[in-house]
Image: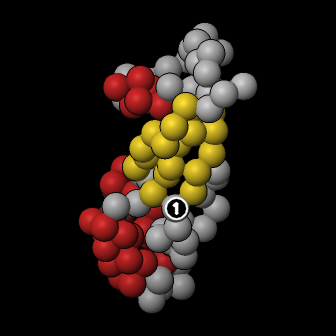
Amino acid sequence: MRKKRFYTDYESVSSATFKHDFKLIQKTEYRIDPNSFPALKTPMKYQFFHDKKQRKNISDHIKQYTAHAIGLGKLFQRSDLRPMFRQFTTLQATVE
């Protein structure tokens, strides 16, 4: 589920099953200790995506910064990357 090429693959939608409550993790603003965070008893299937506004934002940044020799470095230095984080939705509970 890693985003290896966020600047070329920002329109894809991925899904996977996890034993983590991402909604609860999001509520804590992602400030958790993964070693002490409880796992779900029933794994949940999540879908990860960029919404329309995010896709536009990423596209605009790519157009602006890839014209330079060190474009991606400038993008990382000068941009707020938080709006580029994928959104997620719960698809369904899965049975073990």
How crowded is the residue under tag 1: few (<14 C-alpha within 10 Å), some, or many (20+)?
few
Residue 77 appears in the picture as rendered: no
Residue in front for this viewpoint, 89 or 50 = 89
Which residue corresponds to the image point at 48% horizontal and 68% vertical from the top-left? 10
Q: Amino acid at mark 1?
A: Val
Residue in front for this viewpoint, 91 or 34 = 91
Which residue corresponds to the image point at 51% horizontal and 37% vertical from the top-left? 92
> Please, is residue 30 above or below residue 67 in the view?
above
Q: In the orientation shown, which residue stands out farthest toward the bottom?
A: 67
Which residue corresponds to the image point at 47% horizontal and 70% vertical from the top-left? 11
Residue 62: quarter of image: bottom left
Q: In the orientation shown, which residue stands out farthest toward the left?
A: 53
> Please, is residue 15 above or below residue 27 in the view?
below
Residue 74 appears in the picture as rendered: yes
Please indicate whether residue 41 sits to the left or right of residue 7 in the image: right
> Please, is residue 7 above or below residue 42 in the view?
below
Q: Give the x, y percent position of residue 90.
A: 46, 39
Q: In the orientation shown, which residue stands out farthest toward the front?
A: 95
Quadrant in which the C terminus is drawn: top right
Residue that label 1 marks: 13
Which residue corresponds to the image point at 52% horizontal and 67% vertical from the top-left? 12
Q: Give the x, y percent position of residue 64.
A: 36, 82
Q: How is the image coloured?
A: secondary structure
Q: Give the x, y percent position of residue 81.
A: 39, 55
Q: Give the x, y percent position of residue 49.
A: 45, 57
